[in-house]
Each structure stands twice: as structure tokens, then as C-alpha cells.
């Protein structure tokens, strides 16, 4: 099977396994992070909403307390008493000792004339009739103004309460200390990005924002977006950061207290959790990828090895089938050829006997007759050898077991071919394993195999070469290799090496049965025979025989 098939199979298994393994993990991680983000954001929004509501209550209490004090004074003191400068100053001093947050007190008559004043500014005698807050307090009875500049030309706001005394109407006005009030609002500012401020319905700052504006400046928030309840809106900043604002109305829905918080800062814990989740999922993915690649490679490699082994077994079975079929055919052919060969040989002998007669001895063609009979006998002998080998090939079914020392069999085979190799100037090198056990095998057949391989090696080299013989113990097998430095077997012939009657030798120098017979012999012995060959570098045949200990005799 082509190696590219296993590569494609490897890639497909890895791809499918990774998709099946990683997709649920990634989806699960995304779902967990999404759900966790929602819960975390809802928690942050609840915190901001709670802060806005709590801070609004605190500011309401602050304003209510001061309004109640002023109302109590108006209800318990007459206009005549209050318009007295000393009485007002004494009263302001007593109030300042009890509560903070008041800058001054002033008594204003129904015409807006400032009649008495206790405080740090020079406001006595000024007229407030045209001030927007004056008409509202006269109408409503009590009123908390927006922040305005007024006569003192600085941002401030006042709490004013209307009083009635013997058909006279007058106003007790107190200025709220902006520092105390702003400090109260700023207590809701938390973290590096937290903000807390108050705007009116027109979006005008009543207290300064931590980052965006001062009192009486215009904010970029639209107060109409906030409903009656405490609501949260998100606003995208220029630098891309998202800031959430929670707003709650106070002072009869005239002021909006706003708590601002940058979500990124509050999401610090969420980002840490997200990063931890990414690290854990990434490590999990990495482990899955590495495990998938390694296990897939091992599995495909084992599959490839098993497939190659099956192919080798199939090739051996096919070879065995061919040899068995050929053996049967060779038996019939050999018998059919041997009979005419015997007659031809007998007749050739008879003709040679005739040549011994005096009449043929005097014939001028005697030499030609003799040469022809020699040729007939030579070719008959050659044909007989072929049929003999064919019969031997066909009948060589089961080996006869002897006690065999493989190294001794090799030495005996080399002795037979030593002179042949020496005449061709071929050096034979041996590297024999000295501790082979005696095995149960067929010595004569094994020697025939070694002779076939050595003969082929000498024929392949021709002249001036080297044959290396090596034996070693490989696990439970005896291994023998015979290597020559001949021209090698061309790739197109290598598949036919063990086929019967296949030979690359010149006509008349080989029957093409040697390797087929050797293959059959080794197979019957339970061993294997294989070869490697490279053109211009030579060929190495390797035989592996099982170590079968002979039975005790």
C-alpha cells in the first residue's frame, strides 16, 4: 500500500479526533465564560444600583434634616423675634453647634427685602424678590433651590421656608455649605474610576463630577434616560472603555444623583477568571492535540506494519502456490522428457559403438561423427540434469531432520567452492557466530541452499570481488547473510528472483531453479529467505532459521 495513503489516513484521524474532542471543550468554555460574565455584570450593576439608592437616601436625609430645622424655627419663633439681628445670630450659632452644613441664615420679608442676616457674607439689605427661588418658596411654603451664582457670585444652593405671623409673610433662608454637601455626595466614589455627582433635569451639574465637570457645568448625560426607579445605563467613552451609570431621583424628582463606574475596573476579577479559564482550556487542548497525534501515529504505524506483514504472508503464500503447481507440472514434464532422453542416450551409445567398427574407422567423416555424438550426449546430459532438478524440485516436500551445526554446513559448502572462487580471484570473508546451538534440520538441503547462494554470488561477481558471510543469533532465530559486491539485481528483476526458471545468467549456465528450490527448502524448514540489492553495490541474501532443539536419541 502506498505510504501516502497512511499519511492521509493519519491526517484524517487526527483532524476528526481533534474536531470531536476540542469543539465540545471550546463550546463549553465559551458557555461557562458567557454565563459567568452575565452573572458578574449583573452583580456589578446591582452594586452600583444599591450605591445610588443608598446615597440618594443619605442626601435626602441631609436635606430633610435641615429643612425640618428651618420649619421648626419658623413655627416656633415670631417674625419680630427673627428679624432682630442679635436673635438671628444667636439662633444661627446654636444651630451650627448642633448640625453642620449651614453657611448662613437670613430673614426676608414678603417684598424680598433682606431684613436680618447671620453669616460671613455682606448680604443685608439686598432684595431677593426677582430671584427665581423666592417666588417658589412663597408659593410652596418650603423650597430647595438648584445651584446658582446669586449675589455672592459663587455656586451654592439654599433651603428656604415660608413663615406667617399675624398676616405677615416672611421667609427664613439658609445657605447649604457646598463643601459639606459635595463631600457627602463624594462618599459614593469608589476605586480609580468611580464617580458620584448630582445633576438637575437639564443635565446641569449641582455637584462637581470627579472627571467631567464642575458645578453649573453641562454634563453629557441625558437625565431623561433615567426613569422613576433607579436605573442603569451604559455609555461608551472615547478611549473605548465602557462606563455604567446608575441614577436615582431626589428632591421631588428635580435632582438626579448619579453613580458612575467603569466596568473594566470592576471586571478585574472577571478578567483574571477568564485568563485562568483560557490557560486551563489551552493546556487541555495542548494535551489533547499531543495525545491525539502520538496515539494516531502509533496506531497508523502499527496498522502499516500489520498490513506489510499480511502482504509478505500473501506473497509467500502466492509463491508457495506457484511452486506447488509448478512442482506437479514439473513431475509430469520430467517423466515425459526422461523417456525420450533415455532412448536418445541409448541410441547415441549405440552409434558410438558402431563407430568402433573398422568400416567407420576408415571413414573420412569419422571425426565429424564423433563430434556430433559428443554433442548429442552433452545435450542429453544437460537435459537430464534439468529434468533431474525438476524432479528434485517437485519431490522436495518434507525435510529430513538431522543434528545440524549451521557454521559447519557453511564451512563444508565453502570447501566445495573454494577453488572455484580462488580461480576467479574472489575473496571470501567469514564472520561466524561461535556459539550457535545444534538444531534439528536437513543438512543436505541446507547445504544445497548455501551452495546455490554462493554459486550465484560467484557468478554475479565474475572476477575480482569479495563475498562476505556472516552469521548471528537474532532472538530465537539463526541468521545467515551472504553478501557479494557484484553488479546487483536490477529493480525490474527483483520481483521475479524466486520465480522458477527465472535467470539472468547466459543461456546454458543456469536453469533458473536454484533460488526457487532454496526458497522452497527454507520455507519447509520454517524459516525465511530475503534479499536486498542495489545496482553497482551488490546483493545480500539473508536466511533466518528457527532454533529447533533436536530430540534426545
Image (tube, rainbow, N blue to C red):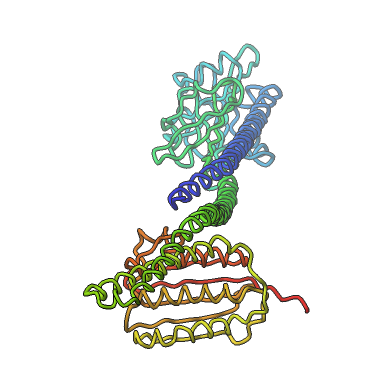
Q: Residue furthest left?
A: 364
> Does residue 427 appear to the left or right of 224 in the view shown?
left
Q: Is residue 273 above or below residue 39?
A: below
Spot occupied by residue 305 in the image (x, y as percentages of width and height): 55, 57
Q: Is residue 53 visible?
A: yes
Point out the image quarter for the C terminus. Answer: bottom right
Q: Residue at x 64, y 79 (%)?
A: 404
Q: Is residue 294 visible?
A: no
Q: Residue furthest top?
A: 167
Examine the image and state in which quarter residue 317 appears. Answer: bottom right
Instruction: Name the foreground residue: 384 vs 315.
Output: 384
Q: Residue at x 38, y 68 (%)?
A: 348
Q: Is residue 510 above or below residue 113?
A: below
Spot occupied by residue 501 in the image (x, y as percentages of width and height): 42, 60
Q: Residue furthest front?
A: 359
Instruction: Name the foreground residue: 187 vs 372.
Output: 372
Spot occupied by residue 133 in the image (x, y as percentages of width and height): 50, 21
Q: Is residue 223 above or below residue 514?
A: above
Spot occupied by residue 319 in the image (x, y as percentages of width and height): 51, 56
> Does residue 15 appear to the left or right of 248 in the view shown?
left
Amino acid at each position: 500500500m502506498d505510504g501516502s495513503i497512511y499519511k492521509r489516513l493519519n491526517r484524517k484521524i487526527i483532524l476528526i479526533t481533534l474536531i470531536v474532542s476540542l469543539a465540545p471543550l471550546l463550546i463549553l468554555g465559551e458557555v461557562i465564560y458567557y454565563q459567568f460574565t452575565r452573572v458578574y455584570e449583573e452583580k456589578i450593576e446591582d452594586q452600583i444600583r444599591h450605591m445610588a439608592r443608598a446615597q440618594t437616601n443619605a442626601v435626602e436625609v441631609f436635606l430633610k434634616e435641615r429643612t425640618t430645622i428651618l420649619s421648626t424655627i419658623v413655627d416656633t419663633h415670631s417674625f419680630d423675634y427673627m428679624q432682630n439681628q442679635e436673635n438671628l445670630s444667636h439662633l444661627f450659632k446654636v444651630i451650627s453647634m448642633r448640625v453642620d452644613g449651614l453657611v448662613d441664615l437670613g430673614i426676608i420679608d414678603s417684598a424680598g427685602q433682606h431684613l436680618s442676616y447671620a453669616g460671613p457674607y455682606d448680604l443685608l439689605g439686598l432684595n431677593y424678590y426677582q430671584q427665581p427661588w423666592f417666588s417658589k418658596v412663597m408659593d410652596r411654603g418650603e423650597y430647595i433651590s438648584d445651584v446658582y451664582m446669586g449675589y455672592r457670585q459663587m455656586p451654592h444652593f439654599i433651603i428656604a421656608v415660608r413663615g406667617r405671623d399675624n398676616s405677615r409673610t416672611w421667609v427664613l433662608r439658609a445657605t447649604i455649605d457646598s463643601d459639606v454637601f459635595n463631600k457627602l455626595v463624594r462618599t459614593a466614589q469608589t476605586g480609580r474610576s468611580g464617580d458620584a455627582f448630582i445633576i438637575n433635569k437639564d443635565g446641569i451639574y449641582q455637584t462637581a463630577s470627579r472627571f467631567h465637570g464642575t458645578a453649573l457645568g453641562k454634563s453629557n448625560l441625558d437625565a431623561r434616560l433615567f426613569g422613576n426607579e433607579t436605573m442603569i445605563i451604559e455609555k461608551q467613552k472615547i478611549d473605548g472603555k465602557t462606563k455604567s451609570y446608575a441614577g436615582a431621583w431626589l428632591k421631588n424628582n428635580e435632582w438626579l444623583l448619579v453613580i458612575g463606574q467603569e466596568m473594566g475596573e470592576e471586571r478585574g476579577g472577571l478578567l483574571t477568571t477568564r485568563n485562568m479559564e483560557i490557560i486551563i482550556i489551552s493546556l487541555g487542548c495542548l494535551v489533547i492535540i499531543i495525545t491525539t497525534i502520538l496515539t494516531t501515529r502509533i496506531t497508523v504505524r502499527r496498522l502499516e506494519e500489520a498490513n506489510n506483514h499480511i502482504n509478505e504472508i500473501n506473497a509467500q503464500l502466492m509463491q508457495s502456490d506457484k511452486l506447488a503447481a509448478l512442482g506437479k507440472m514439473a513431475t509430469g514434464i520430467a517423466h515425459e522428457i526422461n523417456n525420450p532422453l533415455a532412448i536418445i542416450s541409448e541410441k547415441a551409445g549405440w552409434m558410438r559403438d558402431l563407430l568402433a567398427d573398422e568400416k567407420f574407422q576408415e571413414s573420412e567423416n569419422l571425426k565429424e561423427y564423433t563430434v556430433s555424438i559428443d554433442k548429442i550426449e552433452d545435450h542429453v546430459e544437460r537435459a537430464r540434469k534439468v529434468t533431474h532438478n525438476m524432479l528434485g524440485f517437485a519431490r522436495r516436500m518434507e525435510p529430513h531432520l538431522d543434528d545440524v551445526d549451521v557454521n559447519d554446513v557453511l564451512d563444508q559448502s565453502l570447501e566445495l567452492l573454494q577453488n572455484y572462487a580462488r580461480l576467479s580471484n574472489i575473496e571470501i570473508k567469514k564472520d561466524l557466530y561461535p556459539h550457535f546451538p545444534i538444531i534439528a534440520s536437513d543438512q543436505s538441503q541446507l547445504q544445497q541452499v548455501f551452495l546455490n547462494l554462493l554459486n550465484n554470488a560467484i557468478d554475479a561477481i565474475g572476477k575480482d570481488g569479495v563475498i562476505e558471510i556472516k552469521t548471528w543469533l537474532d532472538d530465537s532465530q539463526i541468521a545467515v547473510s551472504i553478501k557479494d559486491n557484484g553488479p546487483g539485481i536490477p529493480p525490474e528483476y527483483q520481483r521475479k528472483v524466486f520465480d522458477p526458471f527465472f535467470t539472468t545468467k547466459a543461456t546454458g549456465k543456469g536453469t533458473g531453479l536454484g533460488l526457487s528450490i532454496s526458497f522452497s527448502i527454507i520455507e519447509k524448514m520454517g524459516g525465511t529467505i530475503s534479499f536486498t540489492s542495489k545496482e553497482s553495490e551488490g546483493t545480500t541474501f539473508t536466511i533466518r532459521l528457527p532454533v529447533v532443539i533436536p530430540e534426545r536419541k
